[in-house]
């Protein structure tokens, strides 16, 4: 396991960015979310535009039971048509696994959908801390004019399942000039 970290990395708590040799970076463009957007034709116009970037620190091998990972997401401001920029969202493969998120800058929404497709959201603002319970699909939406940056921690053995979100979507979308509805959890 020579690819495991040999020492700590650094988290800038003001910017939410991670620093260190072991930090993995991934970037997604609007085009990478082909099939997720309400207006797929509009998405083609912005296909190469940076949508979000993630930084991940995995101090143990993926799948290690009892271990946790640490990372961040920087979700850019913008819209495809009238739909706010969003992450693709996912379920955890081990459905009972939860996750924690802390917003460092920007404004947006943490969208939570249960297995019955009931959707609710929590407003993300600097300092807001969110718990994503198990058995809950989740994505983020940037409703502001600045990048939405948040830190996350999740179990190393949770896995990520994206295919059903691509196929079925979330039961609620977020558009500019359309009031958000937030049903009460049952």
Image (cartoon, rainbow, N blue to C red):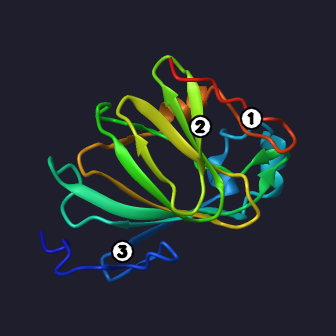
Of circles 3 and 2, the one toward us is 2
> N-terminal of the two: label 3 or label 1?
3
The crowd level at tag 3 (other Cα within 10 Å; few <14, some 14-19, many 20+) is some
Query: Which residue is denoted by mark 1 in the rendering?
Result: 180
Q: Between disc 3 and disc 2, whose residue precedes?
A: 3
Q: Nearer the viewer, mark 3 or mark 1?
A: 1
| The N terminus sits in image quarter | bottom left
Q: Is residue 102 left or right of residue 31?
A: left
Report the residue that reaches farthest toward the left: 1
Q: CA distance from mark 3 to mark 2?
A: 29 Å
Q: Is residue 109 above or below residue 161?
A: below
Could you tell me if the residues under marks 3 and 1 are in contact, i.e. CB atoms within 8 Å? no
Q: Are marks 1 and 2 in contact (CB under 8 Å)?
A: yes
Residue occupying image coordinates x 72% and y 52%: 143
How many numbered marks does the figure carry?
Answer: 3
Residue 174: x and y in percent read 73, 39
Q: Which mark is residue 39?
A: none
Earlier residue among tags 1 and 2: 2
Which dot marks residue 121? 2
Q: Residue at x 74, y 58 (%)?
A: 144
Measured as percent of width and height from the top left, residue 23 is found at: 36, 74
- Percent position of residue 151, x then y: 44, 62
Residue at image point 34% right, 82% down: 20
In space, the residues marked 3 and 1 are separated at their CA atoms by 35 Å
Q: Which residue is mark 3?
A: 23
Distance of label 1 from label 2 (alpha carbons)? 9 Å
Placement of 91 over or under 1, stated as above or below: above
Residue 55 image-quadrant placement? bottom left
Label 1 sits on a secondary structure element that is loop
Residue 78 image-quadrant placement: bottom right
- The percent position of residue 44, horizontal first and vertical second, equals 79, 51
């Amino acid at each position: 396991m020579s690819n495991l970290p040999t020492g700590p990395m650094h988290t800038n708590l003001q910017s939410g960015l991670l620093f260190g040799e072991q930090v993995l970076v991934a970037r997604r463009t609007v085009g990478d979310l082909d099939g997720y957007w309400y207006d797929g034709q509009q998405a083609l116009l912005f296909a190469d535009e940076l949508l979000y970037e993630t930084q991940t620190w995995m101090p143990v091998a993926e799948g290690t039971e009892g271990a946790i990972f640490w990372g961040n997401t920087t979700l850019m401001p913008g819209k495809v048509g009238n739909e706010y920029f969003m992450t693709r969202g996912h379920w955890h493969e081990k459905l009972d696994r939860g996750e924690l998120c802390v917003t460092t800058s920007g404004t947006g929404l943490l969208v939570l959908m249960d297995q019955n497709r009931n959707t609710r959201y929590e407003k993300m603002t600097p300092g807001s801390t969110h718990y994503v319970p198990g058995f809950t699909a989740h994505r983020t939406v940037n409703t502001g004019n600045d990048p939405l940056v948040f830190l996350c921690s999740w179990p190393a053995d949770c896995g990520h399942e994206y295919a059903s979100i691509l196929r079925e979507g979330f039961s609620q979308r977020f558009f500019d000039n359309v009031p958000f509805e937030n049903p009460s959890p049952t």
